[in-house]
Amino acid sequence: MSHPPEIFDIRPSAGPPIYRQLIDQARALIAGGRLKPGDYLPGVRRVAKYADVNPMTVSKAYAQLESDGVVERVPGQGMQVCAPRTTGSLAQRRAQFRAAAQPAFHHAHQLGLSPDDIRRVLDDLLKEYQP
Amino acid sequence: MTTAAPPQPLTVQGLTKSFDAKTVLNGVDLVVEPGTVLGLLGANGSGKTTLLKCVLGLLRPTDGSALVMGDNAWDLSAHTKASLGYVPQEVSSYPWMRVRQAIDYTAAFYPSWNHGLVADLCERWRLPLEERTGVLSVGQLQSLGIVLALGHEPSLLILDEPVASLDPLARRAFLRTLLDILESEDRTVIFSTHITSDLERVASQVAILREGQITYHGGLDQLKDQVKRLRITAKAPLPPAFAVPGALRTRIDGATATAAVSAFDPAVVDNLRHTWDVDVDVTDLNLEEIFVELHGG
Amino acid sequence: MTPRTQQAFNAYLTQRWARPALLAVGVAYLLGMGIGLSQSPVSIHPPLFVGLLGGVVLVVAVWVTGTAKWQFVHPRARMTPGFSGPHLGAAAAWLAVGTIVYPLSLSLVLTASVPALLAYSLAVGALQVWGMHANRMLISPLTIALFMAPNVPQTAPFWTDNTPTLFTAQCGLIAVSLLALAAWLWRLPRLTEESGDYLIPAHAQSGKASRMEKSEARRNMARHFSRSGFFLSVSDRWHDPLARHQASSTAQRQRLLRYGFSAAPIAMRSLGVLLMLLLITGTNAAVSGNDSPLGLVISGIMVLFLGASLTSSRMAMRQPRMQTELLLPLSRADWVTGLFRVCARDTVALTAVAGGALAAWIFLLAPAATDTINARQALAFTAAALAALVAGFATSMQAGLITSGIKRATVLMLGLYAVIVACGVSAGLSFWASPVYGLAVAAALLVAGLLLLRRAHRNWLNAELG
């Protein structure tokens, strides 16, 4: 499935460079399930036109994603989201997930939730996620 | 016939320009590769306009050289000028001519002119074709200047504050036009502007002119990766001896401090964390903030 | 004097040359008065009237009108509280010095009556002020006519005789002129942007004008152009064919440069000059019984001056556009040559028209004037005239580099006087000595002119027009 350029929210005058915003957002979309493996990223030109930015910046972001193995170029079609890598030891993958989860925990702590509240939320999430 | 590579759009070496006793440009070095969109940034009076005028043969350098597509800037050939477009800071047209006549007049000089593009741009910018250019507002004149510079589809486009007098709608329309042009051909664009938000959208490279010299010339993204703001939070008030290595400026306020660095290095930040036992938060800066920090905050 | 009034007075002296000039004039005046008072009153000769009084009044009127207009044709004149009082007072005071105080002082050393002197100075002053203010073509010839009136035998007695009827007439003229000047002072603070005379006489095209002044001057000029329907249709008819033009050679591009100077083509300008010429020679002939060659010579000189000042001011006024023109697909050398060629064609056309009119005048209406010269002298005269043309053209192109109107006028004036003197020497030699000497001087003038032309060309090539 191909997606419209609106999935990206680019702020040229924000701190991070545009290409990095795109990379971060693409990764976030994939991690959040909005972009599934097999989906196509919106075309470079469409994104550039929608966001009123230089197409070269978008190409740069896509090239970086490609070299990181997050997407792959399909001739004639565009950039396709790759299947998630299951390479890397369990410890490594756990470490990656821990890094992603830490901000959420910090946020929960700021909200004043007790460990029990957090566990309850986690159980709900796990139930929702397991099909 | 030698098969030489096509000449660089712009090569400036040691360019110096003085007006009587005042030196405005003090040894400027700049090389622009084809296909680059270069944003020239500088404070008021830093010499941006002088640099552009020296490059175009409107002012004569006191020392140094400038080559535009291989030609010496003071003696540009007709062939080079046919692929060169310039929008000055103050557009001056012939007050008695109607807008369409002024356009036709310029068009008559060039070997190739894209009438369709010009008509499209005039409509996009709502330029009144029947009005005399003398009664146009400053913004309309600037739009006219841009149209006249784009009509012959130059491969090197030089713009001096092209959108300073345009309202936000017109500015966005201009950016879109610029992006349209960029996507179709291998064009080189150099423009000086104060409006950093425009640069961030369009420019691939940035050159900062300060006190008559280029203090930074490189990718916009690299610049953003290099200049960062650090926010340091400690558990106890920081000692006055606290310093961030390589910082542009540091401000200590009890237990927090902010510093701006011009050559960000994660190792240095880690070192800082361990040495002083502090929390360091790294903030990305946009171009305007970078410019302010580099000029002393 | 309150600070405001003082400032208003000083506003007239802000130019760098103003104070030294005023000092020089003051010293000359005191010397002159000193000499004059120590002797018996000089009987009034018409040329004295014009020279001593008329010239001064014209200069004062131009200076005051230009400065006052500049002060009032600006939003600050309406916005600043208490602006009109001091500034009008200063304008009135400077005018009074030139048109009332000065003639009164002259009456002590000349035999002319006070009313005559005052009538002349006030009338010329009023006409010149209004002429400059309204920028109307009509007033100029009137001013010239009045200015020259004491020189003309028929009207000279009006100023020099002393009869009761003349006395009342002169007083009437004084009253009318004072009224006109008062009306001008009254009008100044009431100008609005929509008024027809909201124009800055000194078209602020020079680079030193601020951005706002330039944009206002541009707008005023465009409004000035929009007023005349005939003018506009001529301009359109000339410019519309550009849509179908496509220059395919350097020569064609150089020819295109003729469009950037003014709204109307050369032919129109020649027509204007011709009309002015006919007006002057016609008045001259009507006033004096026979045509002496002097009148024609004066007309020739006027053509030279007019053509040269037109050319040089057109080149100077084009300068703001040159920063874009330099980037048109023409090499710098070709562009400069192209401009020179266009101006040269313009000058030749103008001279041809004027010369033709003069020749027609001579041969049709006053063949007697040619009896005093033979063919060889005529040839020498023509050679001198051609040499003067080339040298005058070179001077005007060199002067065109100067953007400041006053500096340009001065340089042009000096250069053209030198040319005229040389031309006069040549003509004199041809007339009284031998045409061969005259031809030699003419040849020298031609060589000087060509050298100056080459220098002007080189100066334009090296000019920084950014």
Image: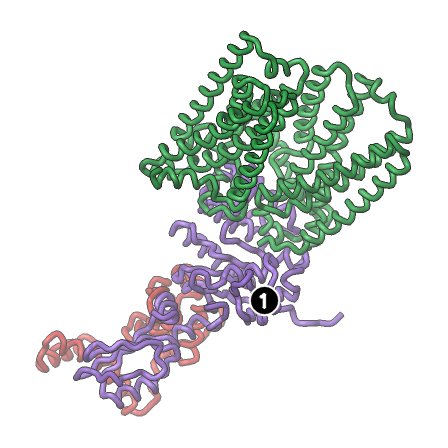
Chain colours: A red, B purple, C green
Viewport quadrant of the C terminus of chain B? bottom left
Look at the image and tell me whether residue C233 can be seen.
Answer: no
Image-quadrant location for residue B52: bottom right
In the displayed structure, does residue C370 sit left or right of residue B139?
Answer: right
Image quarter where the N terminus of chain B lies is bottom right
Left or right: residue A33 compared with residue C450: left
Q: Position of residue B82 (x, y in %)?
A: 64, 55
Above or below, comparing residue B264 to residue C354 in the picture: below
Q: Position of residue C400 (x, y in %)?
A: 64, 45
Q: Is residue B161 visible?
A: yes
The amino acid marked with disc number 1 is Leu
Label total for image: 1
| Residue position marked by numbered label 1 in the rendering | B10
- C224 and C309: which one is in front? C309
Residue density around tag 1, few if under 14, some if 14–19, many if 20 or more, within 10 Å: many
Residue at the location (43% across, 68% down)? A58
Percent coordinates x, y for residue B259 in the rendering: 30, 77
Please tell me which residue lies in front, A126 or B14. B14
Percent coordinates x, y for residue C347 in the rendering: 72, 37
